[in-house]
Structures are given as structure tokens and as C-alpha cells.
């Protein structure tokens, strides 16, 4: 099992920035992909950005170059730096980890709320 703990969410004005962090513990040797998904009220959970152990990344189109994912493998930590935030970025952001085949969606954190005010 893998446990994931997120931090860094909060309230930010449109155009502002946030940095989310997520630390993995437990069976971290089984992780091939770590990243971020989000879920807005009434919407399905969607991929934001993921990064494989070899550094390959996959970003959602809506990121449009505004977000950057990074990892510190020595610390089992993944980050999401978000710039130029928009009200439509408001959602619960979930840290995810797991296999390449599942785009890292085998294990989930508890989620952290990001609210972007207009």
C-alpha cells in the first residue's frame, strides 16, 4: 500500500499562483507514476499532470503551459506549481500514484481544495 498526503491548497485570486506538494510513504518502490488529478463540483475527476519515474510527463490540454509538475524521488514527493490560475481551476486536487497503465491512479491522497476567486 501507498499513502499520499497533500498540502498547499487554499484560496487565491485569479491570476495568482499556488504550489501543491504530496509526499508518498509505504510501498513507494511500487510507484512508477506520480501526479495530480482534480475534481470540480458536479464534474468527473480529471488528469491535470503526471510524471513517470524516468521524467516523462503528461499534461492536460487545459493546463496550457500554466502548470508545471516536478518530483523529488529521494523524498518521494511530487509538486505542482500552478500559475495564472483561473476561476475554472477551482476544484479539489488529488495526488495520485501508481502504475503507468493507470496513469498513476492506483492510490489517492485525501485531496486539497483549491479555490480561485474572480
Image: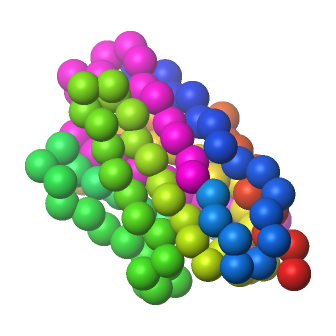
Q: Quadrant of residue 77?
A: top left
Left or right side of 61 for 34: left
In this rendering, the answer to whether 92 lies above or below 42 is above
Front-lying residue, 38 or 15: 15
Give x and y (percent) for residue 37: 53, 57
Residue ranking furthest to the front:
16
Quadrant containing the N terminus in the rendered view:
top left
Residue ranking furthest to the left:
54
Q: Quadrant of residue 44?
A: bottom right
> Which portion, as a residue range, is magenta?
19-43
In this rendering, the answer to whether 86 lies above or below 68 is below
Left or right side of 99 for 86: right
Which residue appears at 81% of the width and 71% of the height? 13
In this rendering, the answer to whether 112 lies above or below 88 is above
Front-lying residue, 52 or 11: 11
Give x and y (percent) for residue 91: 73, 62
Amino acid at each position: 500500500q501507498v499513502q499520499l498526503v497533500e498540502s498547499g491548497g487554499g484560496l487565491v485570486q485569479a491570476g495568482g499562483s499556488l504550489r501543491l506538494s504530496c509526499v508518498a510513504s509505504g510501498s513507494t518502490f511500487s510507484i512508477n507514476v506520480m501526479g495530480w488529478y482534480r475534481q470540480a463540483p458536479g464534474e468527473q475527476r480529471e488528469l491535470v499532470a503526471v510524471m513517470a519515474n524516468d521524467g516523462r510527463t503528461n499534461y492536460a490540454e487545459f493546463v496550457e503551459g500554466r502548470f508545471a509538475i516536478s518530483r523529488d524521488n529521494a523524498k518521494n514527493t511530487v509538486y505542482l506549481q500552478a500559475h495564472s490560475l483561473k476561476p475554472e481551476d477551482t476544484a479539489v486536487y488529488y495526488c495520485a500514484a501508481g502504475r503507468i497503465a493507470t496513469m498513476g491512479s492506483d492510490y489517492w491522497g485525501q485531496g486539497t481544495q483549491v479555490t480561485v476567486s474572480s
